[in-house]
Image (cartoon, grey):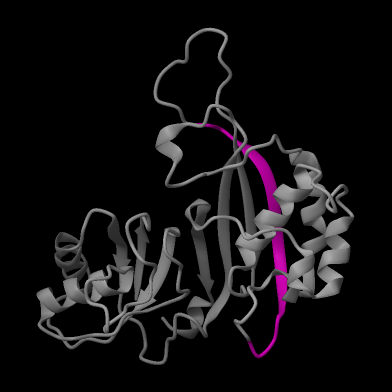
Amino acid sequence: MMELCYDGSRYSGWQGQPEQREVRTIQGELERAIREVTGEQVTVVASGRTDAGVHALYQVASFYVVTRLSAEILRRAVNASLPHAIQIYRMREVWPGFHPIRDVVRKRYRYLLSDTKPFVPFWSNYVWQVLKPVDVGRMAEAGAYLLGRHDFAAFQTVGSPRKTTVRTVFDLAVRIEDCPFPGPLPAGLPRPRLISVEVEADGFLYNMVRAIAGTLVAIGQSRKGFESAERMKAILESGDRSQAGPTAPAHGLFMVKVEYDTARFM
């Protein structure tokens, strides 16, 4: 089991594409590095297959390998073969029945956006710049309608069927973050405003967090048809993706937590 992080800016998502060897993916880089260290061809399975441009502050993945190396020595060796954009925090042995997807108890994602003008250029790979100011309080009020167990079909990308579209959202927070900025700004200029949308649930539909973020921004900007926080309740109950807001761009999304019942696999 690996706990890792990565910057997805230059990668075509998590999923390896054997038929397109020139396409760089997170899975492909990990499998290559493990093969270079152990000589074995392994398949690395992640807790969630992030899309192109999506990042992970914390991701969990697993693979099976026969080696005399300890997990810590293997971690160091694999890290040395990985690009700096992908690094493994920790590696440990788990029982063979562990599955990084099926055994997840809950996951958390963070979406970053900014309504500051002019936009901070070095945020371009990590923050969605929205063109109109947003009302963060109204966004938070709208997000509260999504708490609990609901059918989230209205926030699933069309054409990605699942056995069920019912999920439980444990937490949804919209807030203004302390904004890291390199050095003081000239007098009279406002500090850039960084806004985060964090969602924690027992599972996520395809593009669910990005659809929620896009809908919250539409409500925060009072776009036509999204003038009130209560609109979120109607969207949720409709089960209709066309009723919700746009899918937010991939580059603002970060996986930040994956939680397991450790007693089941350690």
Q: Is residue 250 magenta?
A: no
State the quadrant of the N terminus: bottom left
Could you tell me residue 77's position as x and y percent? 14, 66
Q: Is residue 136 left or right of residue 120?
A: right
Is 41 or 227 nearer to us in this picture? 227
State the quadrant of the C terminus: bottom left
Tell me the quarter of the picture where residue 232 sits.
bottom right
User: Looking at the image, which residue is at 68% across and 36% down?
Assistant: 132
Tell me the quarter of the picture where residue 19 sits.
bottom left
Could you tell me residue 175's position as x and y percent? 67, 41
Tell me the quarter of the picture where residue 10 sits.
bottom left
User: Looking at the image, which residue is at 52% across and 83% down?
Assistant: 103
Could you tell me residue 6's position as x and y percent? 35, 58
Any part of residue 152 in sight: no
Q: Is residue 115 left or right of residue 67?
A: right
Could you tell me residue 221's position as x and y percent? 76, 42
Q: Is residue 169 left or right of residue 13?
A: right
How many numbered dots are placed on residues in this image?
Answer: 0
Up the image or down, 140 lies above or below 134; here it is below
Q: Main secondary structure of the magenta part?
A: strand
Is 186 or 87 nearer to us in this picture? 186
User: Looking at the image, which residue is at 63% across and 86% down?
Assistant: 161
Give the extent of the magenta segment.
Answer: 162-179
Any part of residue 248 in sight: yes
Up the image or down, 96 lies above or below 129; here it is below
Residue at the outermost top position: 187
Up the image or down, 89 lies above or below 157; here it is above
User: Looking at the image, which residue is at 42% across and 64% down?
Assistant: 52
